[in-house]
Amino acid sequence: QVQLVESGGGVVQPGRSLRLSCAASGFTFSSDGLHWVRQAPGKGLEWVAVISYDGSSKYYADSVKGRFTISRDNSKNTLFLQMNSLISEDTAVYYCAKDGFTSMDVWGQGTTVTVSS
Amino acid sequence: QSALTQPASVSGSPGQSITISCTGTSSDVGRYNYVSWYQQHPGKAPKLMIYDVSNRPSGVSNRFSGSKSGNTASLTVSGLQAEDEADYYCSSYTSSSTRVFGGGTKLTVL
């Protein structure tokens, strides 16, 4: 079955960096776009970024533009999110989700990022 | 990239129907028929319930339906069941090729 498994979360100090990974299985990874979506504690969903099937197109939310970079390795069926210059407002559960062209049709279980000194 | 507007909460009794609204702008909800709805139970990942305004993925109950008029989309849940109690989020594609979510609506089954 289609599965997405995030990893790489943890506690990090403000201003530092963290790299999240999302391992995919059960579908043709190189054919689908992928998203990162986050959810701060007790808050709603916030879309973060999307990458096209071949990595040629990337779009970001204004809140992370210039600090976060989405990328993928189709040879390893893995999606990444490089997060730099982290601030407390980046504290959240980060989900990866498969792009169903106009929706996010499969979601991982999430990885927690806490930005704190 | 302002969030779509949803009511904070709605409630209904078992067997009744409820509707959750999702209001955007002419740059997102009003421009594209690319509105989707997600259900999220506490501590769980979101689940796609409706895509392209009114389409249900395989396996989603036909008690869930979607519609759109102008800049406002709606999710209707009919024949409410206890298991429907959850948070619901709408999302739309935007003219900037980004995505935007609503603030979320907590559905309580009385």
Image (cartoon, coloured by chain):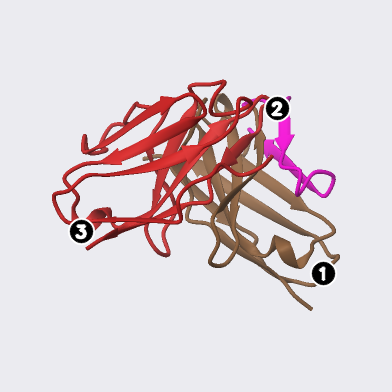
The secondary structure type at the circle numbered 1 is loop
Name the quarter where the C terminus of chain A is drawn. bottom right
Alpha-carbon span between mark 1 and mark 3: 42 Å
Q: Which residue is mark 2?
A: B96
Residue under label 3, please give it.
Answer: B82
Magenta segment: A53-74
The three-letter code of the residue at mark 3 reads Ala
Mark nearest the camera among 2 and 1 is 2
What chain does badge 1 belong to?
A: A
Q: Spot the brown chain and give its letter.
A: A
Looking at the rendered structure, the secondary structure element under dot 2 is loop
Q: Chain of mark 3?
A: B
Judge from the rendering whether residue A3 lies leftward or rightward of residue A81; answer left or right: left
Q: Nearer the viewer, residue A82 or A77?
A: A82
Quadrant of the image occupied by residue A50: top right
Q: Colour of chain B?
A: red
Residue type at the position of mark 1:
Pro
